[in-house]
Image: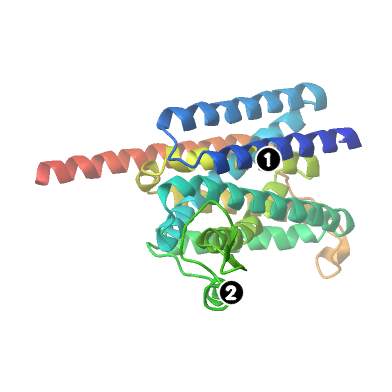
């Protein structure tokens, strides 16, 4: 798929304008958003993503449109799992509720920058070396096994050593504000917001290591990878406030995501075998192995996420009913 330069620039420009507007608006109006507010904005982002996917379907063909929707759903589902860690970070640093929007927004901006870098690095590696798919596939299988064996997410956030060092070393203030830096006795110091945002950014870096290989298992088009990530991240702030309580009900989300990542990992390895150039595998010749079409991938993603959600809500409702009858 050949994407003209103006399309890349327009996409990045629109995303930048939306983020700039968000930064200015949130900085001037620090508050805890209402359910109606986040629902409306989230609805706009989801509608925009669906319309973009339909446009991709019409302009570039059904296969590319399906790749976008599959990538978007995958990135969105991984982002939902990441929200639990964001909740823990907010609690760990004691971020006041009215400033949580600001912290999340800066965290999302960092995530977009990091993922954009990884997207172009991944595209360059894939174009140059087909064996990269082996690495991506094995990494996703490892992540899937790790998710499945770890079980439920930990209830405490394990602070990064770099964040520890920053808290102990950098001149700082304990007063919360929406600013990252402030002046104290004519000296520039970091605010608690800066430390919290940095912690979110470090977490985003780890998330990008999972999400980028996962979506490259569904499409090799960097433009689709970029737009799917942008649409998944744009509504993340609103999703945080909307489903904070619902996250606890998605008890099988980790298992569902491990199955999803394992499926994509297998898909990547099959693709790598189909285009094999590694000398010690079949003498460097491609293998006649079946590849998983994008339509099948899309169906698998919908089924996995659907079963995960329904099973989670059913178990939660059953447990609540049992607890109610027991009391």
- For mark 1, what is the residue? 20
Q: How many marks?
A: 2
The image shows residue 301 at horizontal and vertical percentages of 57, 39
User: Which one is in front, 99 or 213?
Assistant: 99
N-terminal of the two: label 1 or label 2?
1
- Asked if residue 51 lies left or right of residue 92, the reply is right
Q: Are marks 1 and 2 in contact (CB under 8 Å)?
A: no
Q: CA distance from mark 1 to mark 2?
A: 28 Å
Q: Give the residue furthest to the front.
A: 185
Position above or below: 20 against 136: above
Q: Which class describes the residues within 10 Å of circle 1: few (<14), some (14-19), or many (20+)? A: few
Q: Secondary structure at mark 2?
A: loop
Q: Which class describes the residues within 10 Å of circle 2: few (<14), some (14-19), or many (20+)? A: few
The image shows residue 9 at horizontal and vertical percentages of 84, 37
Q: Residue at x 58, y 60 (%)?
A: 182
Q: Which mark is residue 170?
A: 2
Look at the image and tell me whether residue 55 can be seen. Answer: yes
Q: Quadrant of residue 245?
A: top left
Position above or below: 204 against 250: below
Q: Residue at x 60, y 51 (%)?
A: 106
- Asked if residue 251 lies left or right of residue 8, the reply is left
User: Which one is in front, 97 or 219?
Assistant: 97
Q: Quadrant of residue 94?
A: bottom left
Q: Secondary structure at mark 1?
A: helix
The quarter of the rendered structure image containing the N terminus is top right
- Asked if residue 55 lies left or right of residue 156, the reply is right
Q: Residue at x 89, y 58 (%)?
A: 128
Position above or below: 16 against 280: above
Q: Give the residue furthest to the left.
A: 327
């Amino acid at each position: 798929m050949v994407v003209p330069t103006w399309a890349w620039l327009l996409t990045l420009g629109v995303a930048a304008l939306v983020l700039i507007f968000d930064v200015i608006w949130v900085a001037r109006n620090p508050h805890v958003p209402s359910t109606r507010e986040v629902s409306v904005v989230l609805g706009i982002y989801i509608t925009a993503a669906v319309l973009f996917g339909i446009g991709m379907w019409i302009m570039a063909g059904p296969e590319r449109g399906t790749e976008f929707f599959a990538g978007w759903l995958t990135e969105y589902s991984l982002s939902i799992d990441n929200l639990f860690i964001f909740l823990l970070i907010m609690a760990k640093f004691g971020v006041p509720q009215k400033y949580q929007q600001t912290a999340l927004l800066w965290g999302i901006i960092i995530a977009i920058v990091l993922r954009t870098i990884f997207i172009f690095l991944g595209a360059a590696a894939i174009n140059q070396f087909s064996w990269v798919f082996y690495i991506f596939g094995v990494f996703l299988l490892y992540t899937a096994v790790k998710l499945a064996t770890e079980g439920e997410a930990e209830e405490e956030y394990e602070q990064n050593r770099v964040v520890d060092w920053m808290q102990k070393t950098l001149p700082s203030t304990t007063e919360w504000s929406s600013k990252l830096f402030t002046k104290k006795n004519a000296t520039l110091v970091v605010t608690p917001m800066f430390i919290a945002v940095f912690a979110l950014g470090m977490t985003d870096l780890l998330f990008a290591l999972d999400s980028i290989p996962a979506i490259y298992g569904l499409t090799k088009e960097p433009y689709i990878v970029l737009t799917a990530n942008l649409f998944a991240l744009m509504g993340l702030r609103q999703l945080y406030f909307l489903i904070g309580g619902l996250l606890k009900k998605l008890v099988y989300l980790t298992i569902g995501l491990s199955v999803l990542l394992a499926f994509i990992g297998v898909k990547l390895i099959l693709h790598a075998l189909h285009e094999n150039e590694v000398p010690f595998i079949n003498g460097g010749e491609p293998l006649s192995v079946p590849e998983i079409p994008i339509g099948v991938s899309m169906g698998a993603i919908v089924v996995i996420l659907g079963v995960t959600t329904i099973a989670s809500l059913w178990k939660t409702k059953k447990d609540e009913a049992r607890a109610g009858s027991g009391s």
